Amino acid sequence: MRIDPRRWFEKRGKEKMSKVLARTSKEEHEDFERYRLFRGKEVRISNDAFHKLVAERNGRCEVCGKFCGENLVVDHDHVTGSFRGLLCIPCNSAIGFFRDDPSLLEKGSKYLTRHVQRLLDLGKL
């Protein structure tokens, strides 16, 4: 079961959250956040390794290039469980929604291109 920090905070309030955070070290808190972002997947990397990877990538998503800093998530191959890279949440979700299938991503790209071209032809863009 995944803990949603916002719901937890809403139910228990700022005072309780402050007490919990005071009892946990910064590293434990980062581990919780990292686990939450990974959604319990098999891929595990240490905080040190994660921070090193973020620094190597200048905090940018490997797909869209958006700066996310420490808010990047670990992308992994769902068949092998191996690490692929660090992505922003929208890009990681999009790849998941396309079931890690490059041909579906390509079809999606062609679909959007056709739609944009149609709007250009109609003078709406």
Image (spheres, grey):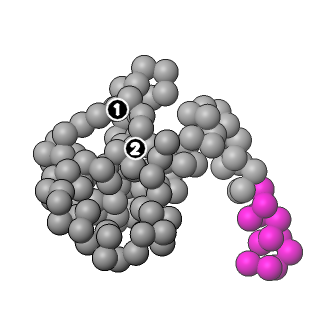
The residue sitting at 18% across, 46% down in the picture is 47
Q: Report x, y in % for residue 48.
A: 13, 45
State if disc 1 and disc 2 touch (CB < 8 Å): yes
Q: Secondary structure at mark 1?
A: loop
Magenta region includes residue 69: no
Magenta region includes residue 121: yes
Q: Amino acid at mark 2?
A: Phe
Task: Write down the region rendered in magenta.
Answer: 114-125
Residue 54 is at least partly visible in this image: no
Which residue is under mark 1?
A: 43
Q: Amino acid at mark 1?
A: Val
118 up-or-down from 109: above or below:
below
Measure how far apart labels 2 and 1 are at the Cα level. Answer: 8 Å
The residue sitting at 31% across, 76% down in the picture is 15
Q: Nearer the viewer, residue 98 or 108?
A: 98
Query: Crowding near pointer 2: few (<14 within 10 Å), some, many (20+)?
Result: some
Which residue is under mark 2?
A: 38
11 up-or-down from 52: above or below:
below
- Residue 105: image quadrant is top right
Q: Report x, y in % for residue 6.
A: 46, 67
